[in-house]
Image (cartoon, rainbow, N blue to C red):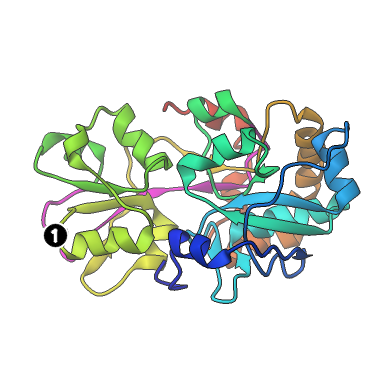
């Protein structure tokens, strides 16, 4: 990513086998895979409380998640999740940077205990995992060459011009939107991370990069502009993700999330990353899980 200079792929190469579980106030100082479970016959929540840490799947896409040069992780989702888990008596976290398309399979394979990456809710994902109630609501935009020469303002514009190529992160919400809207595969350009999406535009390999508005704002550079929020994309939002069997974990998390939402700290956390607590009020998990895709 432009802000950190670290790609997801590069971070995974550099993380090696080192795992550092830091206090929630610092979130973490290293990211890697950890061995599943403790062998205890208890629920995931019981195991996490017993061992004192949770394994969390993250991305590297500011402002949702941000990996710093020293390996520490912040961003709106890790900050919210860490605050809620602290209220649950879980004092540390081990983070794993992984591509979006691997997050749900990895969760169901017990490689991590929670997804905390701004993985937007939609029908297909809600069929595979449990979500908490939403903690953020977001908008989508295009990054385009300066001047927006193709005058792209929405998905309809992409479908209307077969020559338009749109860059997306494989497995991301935006990738799903294009496929749901039956945008031909030849118009979709897969890129591994945010910086690569910007470079694809600058090099002429793509005419637009489709990503949440705030993520694109963090990547903005010379020669690139960000469109207004796209109107023909359904409302998006995210929360923490849990395995289907971890209903007790989800319920306990939801209870503490609801309490956290009533504090000034919640609004301040979202505002720090450009989100609004007001946007989340009244938006439910059921609404977001009804989003097609």
State the SS at label 1.
loop
Q: Residue at x 76, y 50 (%)?
A: 54
Q: What residue sits 60% from the left and 70% below the top?
A: 71
- The residue located at (62%, 41%) in the rendering is 134
Query: Residue 2's spot in the image, x, y percent?
Result: 39, 71
| Residue at the image point whose x is 83% and y is 39% from the top | 45
Q: Is residue 69 above or below residue 133?
A: below
Q: Please give left or right for residue 204 compared with residue 179 in the image.
A: left
**Residue 228 is covered by the magenta coloring:** no
* Residue 237, x across and y down, in percent: 53, 42
Q: Position of residue 255 (x, y in %)?
A: 81, 40
Q: Quadrant of the N terminus?
A: bottom left
Quadrant hosting residue 149: bottom left
Mark 1 lies on residue: 204
The residue lying toward the viewer, choosing from 141 and 219, is: 219
Quarter residue 292 falls in: top left
Residue 60 x, y percent position in the rendering: 50, 60
Quadrant for the C terminus, please: top left
- Crowd around label 1: few <14 · some 14–19 · many ≥20 (10 Å): few
Would residue 242 appear left or right of 50 to someone viewing this image?
A: left
**Would residue 193 appear left or right of 185 to someone viewing this image?**
right
Q: Can residue 273 be seen in this snapshot? A: no
Vertically, is 246 above or below 1?
above
Q: Does residue 264 sit above or below 69 in this rendering? A: above
Q: Which residues are magenta?
A: 130-152
Residue 146 in the magenta stretch? The answer is yes
Q: Residue furthest front?
A: 17
Q: Specify whether residue 275 is in view.
A: yes
Left or right: where does residue 260 sit relative to residue 283? Answer: right
């Amino acid at each position: 990513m432009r802000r950190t200079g670290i790609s997801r792929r590069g971070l995974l190469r550099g993380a090696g086998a080192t795992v550092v579980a830091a206090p929630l106030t610092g979130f973490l100082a290293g990211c890697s895979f950890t061995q599943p479970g403790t062998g205890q016959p208890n629920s995931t929540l019981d195991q996490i409380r017993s061992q004192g840490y949770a394994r969390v799947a993250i991305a590297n896409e500011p402002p949702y998640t941000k990996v710093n040069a020293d390996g520490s992780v912040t961003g709106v989702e890790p900050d919210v999740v860490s605050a809620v888990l602290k209220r649950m008596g879980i004092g540390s976290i081990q983070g794993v940077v992984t591509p979006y398309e691997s997050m749900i399979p990895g969760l169901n394979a017990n490689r991590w205990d929670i997804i905390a990456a701004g993985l937007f809710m939609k029908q297909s994902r809600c069929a595979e995992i449990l979500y908490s109630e939403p903690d953020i609501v977001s908008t989508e935009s295009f990054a385009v060459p300066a001047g927006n020469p193709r005058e792209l303002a929405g998905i309809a514009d992409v479908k209307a011009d077969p020559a338009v190529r749109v860059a997306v992160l494989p497995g991301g919400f935006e990738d799903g939107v294009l496929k749901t809207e039956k945008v031909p595969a030849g118009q979709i350009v897969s890129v591994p991370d945010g910086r690569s999406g910007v470079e694809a535009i600058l090099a002429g390999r793509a005419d637009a990069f489709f990503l949440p508005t705030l993520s694109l704002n963090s990547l903005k550079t010379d020669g690139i502009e960000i469109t207004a929020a796209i109107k023909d994309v359904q409302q998006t939002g995210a929360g923490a993700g849990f395995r289907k069997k971890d209903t007790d974990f989800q319920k306990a998390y939801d209870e503490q999330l609801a309490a956290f939402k009533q504090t000034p700290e919640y609004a301040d956390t979202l505002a720090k990353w450009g989100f609004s607590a007001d946007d989340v009020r009244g938006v439910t998990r059921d609404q977001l899980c009804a989003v097609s895709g």
